[in-house]
Amino acid sequence: MVNFNKTIYIVLIVVVLLLALPLYFFIDPSVSAFFPKCPFLSFTGLYCPGCGSQRAVHNFLQGNIITGIKHNYLILLLVLVLAYQAILFLFNKFGSKTYDNLLHKSKMTKAILAMVIIFWVLRNIPIAPFSELAP
């Protein structure tokens, strides 16, 4: 029963993503009021680790990969984690051998958290070269 529920959640997430992709392809979040603005930035004036992600997705879909990465460098980590999760899921689902998920190890979780916090702090330092990390 647990696997069935997990499969339903995965299917729902994929469907929502597939419905959202055309919006991000056709509408530029930097000029549209349709997309939500970052509440953390609105309240504090500081960039959160996710600031610039909507613009990055829009640029990726438009084929502007470098511009997208410049909006949020942390999206590279997200892409790596999602790709790893997808590949591991496929190997475990259809392969003959079961592989452990390294992302579920506490050291890996702490390392990713540390990277996110360091990125968060550095992107809010308004001097070069750190200002390059701002969206």
Image (tube, rainbow, N blue to C red):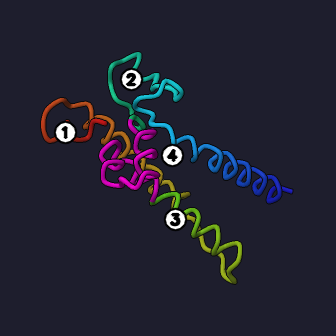
Question: Magenta residues, as a range?
Answer: 52-79
Q: Is residue 96 magenta?
A: no
Q: Which residue is mark 1?
A: 130
Residue 113, given in percent of the width and then of the height, sits at: 42, 45
Q: Which residue is mark 3?
A: 84
Residue drawn at point x = 58 percent, y = 46 percent: 22
Q: Which residue is mark 4?
A: 25
How far apart marks 4 and 1 lie (CA) works out to 29 Å
Amino acid type for the residue under numbered disc 1: Phe
Q: Is residue 63 magenta?
A: yes
How far apart marks 2 and 3 lie (CA) works out to 30 Å
**Mark found first going from the N terminus, 3 or 4:** 4
Residue 102, given in percent of the width and then of the height, sits at: 52, 64
Q: Residue furthest right?
A: 1
How far apart marks 3 and 4 lie (CA) works out to 25 Å
Residues at discs 1 and 3 in contact (Cβ within 8 Å)? no
Q: Residues within 10 Å of mark 3 (few under 14, many from 20)?
A: some
Residues at discs 3 and 4 in contact (Cβ within 8 Å)? no
Amino acid type for the residue under numbered disc 2: Leu
Residues at discs 2 and 3 in contact (Cβ within 8 Å)? no
Q: Element at badge 4?
A: helix
Magenta segment, prevailing SS (helix, strand or loop)? helix
